[in-house]
Amino acid sequence: MGWFDRKRHDSGEWTGFLDQGVKLEGRLECSGTFRIDSAMKGTLVSHETLILGEHAKVEGQIDGNYVIIGGHFDGTIKASGKVEIQTKAIVTGEIHTPCLIMEPGAIFDGRCHMLAATEASKPITIPIRSAAAHA
């Protein structure tokens, strides 16, 4: 069960995964904890924890709660909880979240809209470009 080894996430029951070699195009909705280590183009909707593993290559939009990225993502992330970009991850596009965590070595090239706790407040937009992207 190597796809569970990276980190332990106890936010909910595991509801599924897409392993290497799988290609998916379209819309995927999931509850519980779901992991993707495959290629995907489209929309991901997650009500709990969504993990893009180190081998993931995802293009499109994520609407989620807690999003963890360890692979490649290009598109827009809208997270109501938090977004975590891990050490080997490469993320391009836009992130809308109240909490962004970037581990050392992570690459993010895009815009981050830090959402306030209440929807009535205006979000703060922070353009970010990783120094490693220019090296």
Image (cartoon, rainbow, N blue to C red):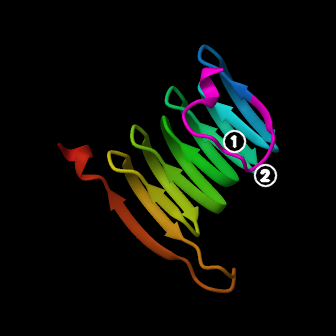
Residue positioned 37% across, 46% down in the render: 106
Helix, strand, or loop for circle 2?
A: loop
- Say if 134 sits above or below 19 in the image: below
Query: Callout 1: 10 Å neighbours few (<14), some, many (20+)?
Result: many
Q: Position of residue 130 (x, y in %)?
A: 29, 52
Q: Position of residue 84 (x, y in %)?
A: 52, 52
Q: State the CA–CA distance, disc 2 to disc 1.
A: 13 Å
- Say if 61 sits above or below 19 in the image: below
The residue stretch that appears in magenta:
1-16
Residue 15's quadrant in the figure?
top right
Residue positioned 48% across, 34% down in the render: 71
Quadrant including the N terminus:
top right
Residue positioned 77% across, 30% down in the render: 16
**Is residue 28 left or right of 132 when viewed as pictured?**
right
Residue 83's quadrant in the figure?
bottom right
Q: Position of residue 122 (x, y in %)?
A: 58, 83
Q: Which residue is mark 1?
A: 43
Task: Confirm whether the magenta stretch covers residue 63.
Answer: no
**Is residue 54 left or right of 118 when viewed as pictured?**
left
Quadrant including the C terminus:
top left
Chief secondary structure of the magenta span?
loop
Residue 115's quadrant in the figure?
bottom right
**Is residue 133 left or right of 33 when viewed as pictured?**
left
Q: Position of residue 103 (x, y in %)?
A: 40, 51
**Label disc, if present, on residue 54 of the rendered structure:** none
**Label disc, if present, on residue 47 of the rendered structure:** 2
Residue positioned 58% across, 70% down in the render: 98
Number of numbered callouts drawn: 2
